[in-house]
């Protein structure tokens, strides 16, 4: 995946490049809003990670110009501006999602994948972990040749967790994917769905759903 990172913090940009490159992603970094606008117009990218506080033109102006020009590039706004007003402003000018600093890299990866999934519907593709097969096009899953009976919500949850094995998926990310909103402090529905999914997966070879206390959940491949 080709990602345009618009971030003037060189340490953060370097750290993200170090994380994303081994996963097969190519990162182009721009520390200037106008430079990023030119880059986005000149070459195709699969997604943009956009900090709002970049120089020359800020992130909101950059995003507005892209959308005014007809660009449908998936954009994840990444910023230290964590207020509700800033979040709404970013979404109103066309951001696909919003993640405030500081953040967990695993959540950033999950958010990018979710943005890509919403922007580009998935074609026929099968995810395989151990003896588990997840057919995203047919929305069905098997343990070897035995189909696992899943509700629509359970399948969505399984698909989200198996997209990036070994990566923590936060409760907010799950809530956004399932319900289109962040989770609440007293939200129990996600825990119930995870519990049901665990029972249905049973003792599938090579797969388990791990709870990361205070963070979320992770499909953990194992031998």
Image (cartoon, rainbow, N blue to C red):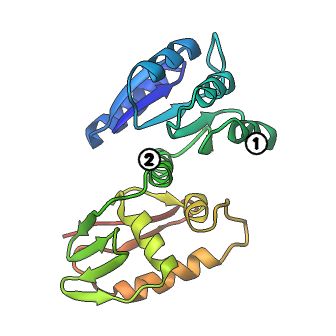
Task: Point out residue 158 in the picture as x, y percentages from the top left corner.
Answer: 41, 72
- The CA distance from mark 1 to mark 2 is 22 Å
Q: Which residue is mark 1?
A: 88
Task: Point out residue 111 in the picture as x, y percentages from the top left corner.
Answer: 51, 50
Looking at the picture, tell me which residue is in the foreground, 173 or 106: 173
Task: Point out residue 220 in the picture as x, y percentages from the top left corner.
Answer: 33, 66
Q: Is residue 9 above or below residue 201?
A: above
How packed is label 1: few (under 14 Cα within 10 Å), some, or many (20 or more)?
few
Q: Which residue is mark 2?
A: 109
> Residue farthest to the top?
56
How packed is label 2: few (under 14 Cα within 10 Å), some, or many (20 or more)?
some
In the drawing, what numbered circle is on residue 31?
Answer: none
**Under tag 1, what secondary structure?**
helix
Please give left or right for residue 107 compared with residue 24 in the image: right
Locate the C terminus and report the quarter of the image it occupies: bottom left
Locate the N terminus and report the quarter of the image it occupies: top left
Please give left or right for residue 53 compared with residue 17 in the image: right
> Residue farthest to the right?
85
Residue found 69% across the figure and 36% down from its top = 90
Question: CB of mark 1 within 8 Å of CB of mark 2?
Answer: no
């Amino acid at each position: 995946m080709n990602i345009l990172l618009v971030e003037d913090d060189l340490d953060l940009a370097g750290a993200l490049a170090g994380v994303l490159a081994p996963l097969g992603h190519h990162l182009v970094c721009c520390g200037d809003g106008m430079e990023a606008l030119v880059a986005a117009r000149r070459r195709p990218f699969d997604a943009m990670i956009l900090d709002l506080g970049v120089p020359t033109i800020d992130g909101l102006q950059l995003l507005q110009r892209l959308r005014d020009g007809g660009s449908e590039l998936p954009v994840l706004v990444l910023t230290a501006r964590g207020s509700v007003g800033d979040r709404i402003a970013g979404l109103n000018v066309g951001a696909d999602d919003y993640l405030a600093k500081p953040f967990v890299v695993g959540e950033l990866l999950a958010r990018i994948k979710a943005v890509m999934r919403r922007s580009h519907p998935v074609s026929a593709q099968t995810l395989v972990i151990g003896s588990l097969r997840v057919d995203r096009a047919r929305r069905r899953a098997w343990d070897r040749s035995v189909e696992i009976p899943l509700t629509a919500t359970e399948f969505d949850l399984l698909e989200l967790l198996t997209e990036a094995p070994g990566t923590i998926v936060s409760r907010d990310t799950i809530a956004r994917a399932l319900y289109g909103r962040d989770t609440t402090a007293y939200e129990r529905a996600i825990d119930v769905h995870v519990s049901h999914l665990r029972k249905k997966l049973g003792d599938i070879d090579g797969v388990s759903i791990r709870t990361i206390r205070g963070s979320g959940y992770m499909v953990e491949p194992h031998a």
